[in-house]
Amino acid sequence: MGVKDFVSISMETNPARAPGRPRSFDVDSALDAATRVFWSRGYSDASLDDLTGAMGISRPSLYGAFGDKQALYLKCIERYRGWVEAAIGAALLDSAHPHASLLRMFSDAIALYTTPASEPRGCLLASASLSEAALSQVSRDSIAQALATVEAVLADFFRRSGLADKLAGERARLTATFLYGISSRARLGVAAQTLLEDAERFVDLLA
Amino acid sequence: MGVKDFVSISMETNPARAPGRPRSFDVDSALDAATRVFWSRGYSDASLDDLTGAMGISRPSLYGAFGDKQALYLKCIERYRGWVEAAIGAALLDSAHPHASLLRMFSDAIALYTTPASEPRGCLLASASLSEAALSQVSRDSIAQALATVEAVLADFFRRSGLADKLAGERARLTATFLYGISSRARLGVAAQTLLEDAERFVDLLA
DNA sequence: CAAATATCGTACTGATCGGTAGATAGCCGA
DNA sequence: TCGGCTATCTACCGATCAGTACGATATTTG
C-alpha cells in the first residue's frame, strides 16, 4: 500500500472526482427540501412524489443517494437535530444572565417554529415523535436521543448559571416541557408575538 | 313497553325500533374502539382494517353507521373533546384552592395521557393537530375549537380564583402551553411520576 | 305468510403507495 | 476512442389504501 498511498491521496481522500457519471443535484439542498416536506406533512403523509417534487430529482436518484424513505427521513432528522442543538447551545452560551439567555433561546425557537407565517411547522422533532407508529426503531431512537440532548444542554446551562444539580435538572425538564408546548401551539397557528409573550411570562416565573 | 306502545308518537320519537335489520353492534363502544386506534396511530396511519378490526365490525357496517373515515374521525374527536372538557371542568370546579385544583387537573390529565403505560398516547387533540395536512377543514376546525375551549375553561378558573381578566388569560395560556408539553413528553414515554413532579414544580411557580 | 327495509359479509374497484428493472447518458482512466 | 462505472429517466411492479356493489340475512309491517 505504500506506493499506492502516494497516488491514492489525491484519488481517494480528495473528493474532487469519483468514477462514473457525476451527480447532477446538490445533496445538501435536496436534503433541505426533503426536511421541509417532512416537517410540514409528517412522515406518512409525505409521499415520494411530494419529496421528489420538492427536491427536484427523480425517484431512482433519491434512492441512489439516500436509500429508502426511512433512511432519508433519518438523515433529515439528524440534520435538523444539528441545527437545533447549535442554535440552543449558542443562545444559552452566556449563563451569567440566565433571564436574557433563556429569552433569546425561546425567541430563536419561536422564530424557527413560526417561519414562514403561512406554514408554521412547530418543532420537527416534537411532531416526528407523534408519528411513532409508522417509524422504525432506529428513527425513534434518533428522535429520542435528539430530544434528550436538548434537555441535557438546558440542564448544563442551569448548572453553569449556579443552580445545584437536582434543581438544574428540574428547571431543564420544566423548560423543555414548556418548549414542546410552544411548538404545539406554534403549529396550531398561534401568532409568534403571543408565543413570545407567553415565553416571557414563563421566564419571569422561572428566574 | 306497553304504555309506550299505547302512544303512537313513540314510533317516530322513540328509537325503540326501526324498520329493517337491527344493528348488531353497539355504536358507542365501536366509537370508543375507533378513538383508541386514532389516538394511538394518528389519522393517516390508522387504516380501515385497523379500525374495523378494533371495532369488531365490517367495512360496510362502518360506512353505514358513521360515513367515511373523515366523518368517523370527526365523531371520535368530538367524543374525546367531551371527555376532556368534563374532566378539566370537574377538576377545576373548586377555585378556592387553586393550587390543589390545578394539581388535580394535571394529575388527571397525566393519568389519561400515560394509560396504559405500554402505550402512552398523550392528548388526542394535541396529536391530531399535528397531522393537519391530511385532514379536512371541518376536522381542523373541530380540533382548534376543542383546544380553545380548554383554554377558556382555564381562563374562567383563574378568573374565579380572583385574578384580573388580563392576568387570568395569561395564566390560562401558560398552563395550556405547559399541558401541551406534558402531552408531548407523555407520548415520548416519559414516566407518569416524572411528569407529575414537573407539574408540581410548575404549579408551585404559578401559585 | 309476504313485502318492505336496513344491516351484514364477501369480494371487489380504481387510485395511490413505496420501491425497482432496464435502458440511456455522462464522466473517468487508459 | 473505448471499457468501466455511476447517475438518470421512463415505465413499471406488487401491496395497500379508502370506498363500494351485491347478494344474503334479519327484523318490522300488513
Image: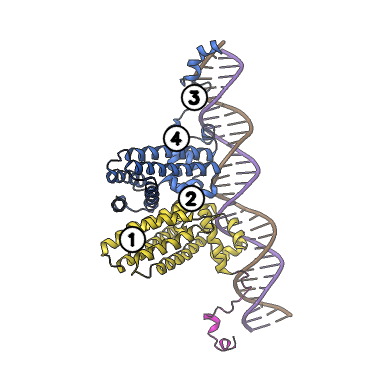
Chain colours: A blue, B yellow, C brown, D purple
Amino acid type shown at disc 2: Leu
Q: Which residues are magenta?
A: B1-25
Magenta stretch contains residue B88: no
Frontmost of labels 3 and 1 is: 1
- Residue holding disc 1: B172
Report the front residue among C6 and D26: D26
Answer yes or no: do the residues labelled 3 and 1 have beta carbons within 8 Å? no
In primary-sequence order, the first of circles 2 and 1 is 1
Q: If the image is split into quadrants, where does the C terminus of chain B sit?
A: bottom left
Q: Mark 4 and mark 2, same subunit? A: no
Towards the viewer: A88 or C3: A88
As for residue B22 lying within the magenta part, the answer is: yes
- Residue that mark 2 sits on: B188
Determine contact: label 2, label 1, CB under 8 Å. no
Kind of residue sitting beneath label 3: Pro
Q: Is residue A137 above or below residue B12?
A: above
The residue at which mark 3 appears reads as: A22
Q: What residue is pinned by disc 4?
A: A30
Q: CA distance from mark 1 to mark 4?
A: 42 Å
The chain ID associated with circle 1 is B
